[in-house]
Amino acid sequence: MAHTVRIAGGHDIERGVIVANQRLVTSGIAPLKPKRLAWSSIIGAADGLSQAEIVSATDDAAKTAILDERNEITSEDIISRLRGRHAMRTAFLDAQSL
């Protein structure tokens, strides 16, 4: 049985998935200095997204920080982009079911 970890929001996620998602996020924000990141909240927001969606959301968050002329990225920057990906996914699935 895989080892699971309870994260923010009461989700149980496998440790391997947490590590993989942390690596995806970390690689996407590499050019920026992260402020102290709220990993539990970030992993919770990433839950249910594909690796490609996580990478895309993280890249978008980094690009926004750079365009805003900031050299730091916050948890909220990343979480808001992950939530945006969830919203796009839901809208796409809803449109398919019509």
Image (cartoon, rainbow, N blue to C red):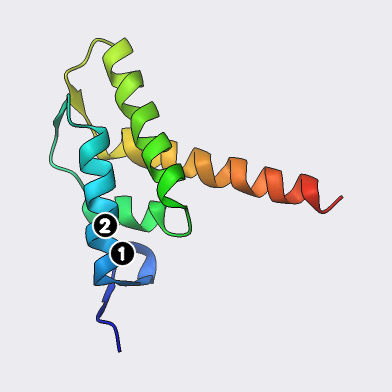
Residue 30 drawn at (x, y percent): 17, 31
Position above or below: 3 against 63: below
Residue 31 screen position, x and y as percent = 17, 24
Quarter of the image for residue 35 reads top left
* Residue 37 percent coordinates (x, y): 18, 44
17 or 35, which is in the foreground? 17
Q: CA distance from mark 1 to mark 2?
A: 5 Å
Q: Amino acid at mark 1?
A: Val
Q: Residue at x 26, y 40 (%)?
A: 75
Q: Are marks 1 and 2 in contact (CB under 8 Å)?
A: yes
What residue does disc 1 label?
Answer: 17
Q: Is residue 85 above or below residue 30?
A: below
Which one is nearer the viewer's eye here, 31 or 35?
Answer: 31
Q: Residues within 10 Å of mark 2 (few under 14, many from 20)?
A: few
Q: Is residue 71 above or below residue 73?
A: above
Residue at (82, 54) in percent of width and height: 97
The residue sitting at the right extreme is 98
Residue at position x 20%, y 41% in the image: 26
Q: Quadrant of residue 63?
A: top left
Q: Is residue 70 above or below residue 6?
A: above
**Residue 20 numbered tag:** 2
